[in-house]
Amino acid sequence: MARDGSIEPCESAEQAEANARSSLRTDDQPALDLPSLSQRASQGLAEQFHLNAAQIRKDLAYFGEFGVRGVGYYVKELRRHLRQILGLDRRLRVAILGAGNLGLALADYPGFRQEGFEIAALFDAASEKVGHESRGGVPIYDIKELKRIARRERLDIAVIAVPAPHAQAVVDQVVTAGIKGILNFSPGALHVPDDVKLKSVDFTVSLESLSFYLAQGDNGG
């Protein structure tokens, strides 16, 4: 935390991991909003989120001093700070590139809105899809209009849900449109400038990880 009280961005790998674990904690809103709990110790939070109490204290220390020694953490204040750290104290406008099955499913997922992510637009190159809407009412635009719509709708994040052969070209269009955050669901490595943050979700890698876990169990590991 800066001297003026503002939250400074995370830079190190350790801070990035702390940020990710903080996100897990804010996901469990009921646990942080119980009316009977005005404060909680790190041990209680550790048991709630299946983490180590020392790790929780270390993670939170990256972002400032939230707890009171011998007392614990004031729940509402802690939650407010965590949401501020993660940028969830404001609405973020999101575009989904690719109006196929995955893109349409993501566009209509209600959980995004609940956490402050507004799905503002879908984009596709198929003329038969342009001009229509998802079941939830998200409009589908021609991808050629991305730059104009991005400015008009003030888009913050782009989600890539197109086939792998087209992914890099679509990412390049996203970068040209001035969008600085990209969540990629297409397989393969993509390249972006240093001032753009790219996060990839690879289902195949995740399934392989689960396969390895199951194999170890079958082998008595």
Image (spheres, rainbow, N blue to C red):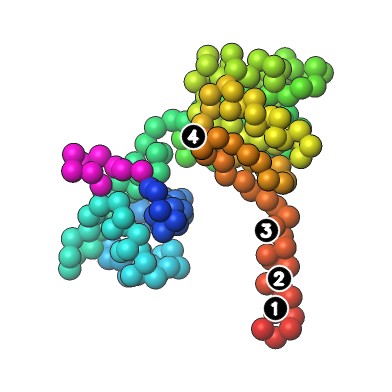
Residue 9: give x, y in percent of width and height: 36, 43
Nearer-N-terminus badge (4/1): 4
| Residue 204 vs residue 176, the one in the foreground | 176
Nearer-N-terminus badge (4/3): 4
Q: Secondary structure at mark 3?
A: helix
Image-based side of 122 in relation to 125, left or right:
left
Q: Which image quadrant for residue 124?
A: top right
**Nearer to us: label 4 or label 3:** 4
Q: Residue 216 has which mark? A: 1
Tell me, yes or no, whether the two marked residues, 4 and 2, touch with CB atoms within 8 Å: no
Q: Is-magenta flag for residue 83?
A: no
Q: Residue 206 has which mark? A: 3
From this viewpoint, which residue is outermost toward the bottom?
Answer: 220
Tell me, yes or no, whether the two marked residues, 4 and 1, touch with CB atoms within 8 Å: no
Q: Can you identify the residue that label 4 sits on?
A: 195
Q: Can you identify the residue that label 2 sits on?
A: 212
Marks 4 and 3 sit apart, C-alpha to C-alpha, by: 27 Å
Q: Does the rendering let one see residue 171?
A: yes
**Nearer to us: label 4 or label 1:** 4
Tell me, yes or no, whether the two marked residues, 4 and 3, touch with CB atoms within 8 Å: no
Magenta segment, prevailing SS (helix, strand or loop): loop
* Residue type marked 3: Ser
